[in-house]
Amino acid sequence: MKTRALILFASLLMAGSIFAAPITYSVIMNGPSESPPEASAGTGFALVTLDAVANTLSITETFANLNAGTTANHIHCCTPSPFTGVAGVATQVPSFIGFPLGVTSGSFSTTLDMTQAATWNPAFITASGGTPAGAEAVLVAGAAAGTAYLNIHTTFAPNGEIRGFLVPVPEPGTLAFAVAGLAGVVLIRRRR
């Protein structure tokens, strides 16, 4: 019985540290993923990291082969159903500051402070309770639920030429936690 209590206590400690960690999402963008789908040979890849403890949003992305020059890039949230549909712009409008405009290929990287109103679309702040903290909470929940996406708009496709939903990247700590939990269950069963 003491062993079981010790394993439960250790698991709870580990779980707290796992959920406090930043969450990284991968984003694979293409034309067919737009809604409605776009006839684009354009592709893109991004890593989006949401850190609810440091209140930061980090984005690193590359894109190529767009049909026309870029006009905007931002995260939309939250669609009515996971991995489908459309949503309003959540982050900076008309585009992330520093995103390369007028190009068909490029790369971009930024880290934003989610406690600052300048990180958000004012309409998203209003719809999320009227504060940057509310906007942050809605985006974090939307990303976790599969209802947030990143897209790139161009003169060819003003509503978005390529997009991709944020998909969580499994972290090594999560896998280690699962293995440790299974090992604990096996150990308890063997002792019986």
Image: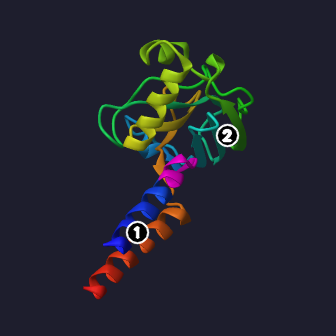
CA gap, disc 2 to disc 1?
54 Å
Is residue 115 placed above or below 63 in the rendered structure?
Answer: above
Whether residue 11 is situated above or below residue 167 in the rendered picture = below
Q: 131 or 120, which is in the foreground?
A: 131
Asked whether residue 79 is drawn in magenta, I would say: no
The residue type indicated by label 2 comes to Thr
Where residue 192 sits in the image (x, y, percent)?
24, 85
Q: Position of residue 38 (x, y in %)?
A: 44, 39
> Which one is in front in this view, the residue at disc 2 or the one at disc 1?
1
Front residue (pair 182, 7)? 7
Residue span colored magenta: 16-25
Residue at 38%, 30% in the rendered image = 86
Determine the image quadrant of residue 117. top right
Q: Tag 1: residue type? A: Ile
101 vs 42: above or below: above
* SS assignment at label 1: helix
Q: Which mark is residue 7?
A: 1
User: Which residue matches tag 2?
Assistant: 104
Q: Is residue 17 magenta?
A: yes
Q: Along the horizontal axis of the image, is 92 left or right of 110?
A: left
Is 169 or 40 nearer to us in this picture?
169
Q: Which tag, 2 or 1, sits closer to the chain's start?
A: 1
Residue beneath the point at 44% across and 23% down: 88
Which of the two residues, 11 or 151, is positioned nearer the viewer here? 11
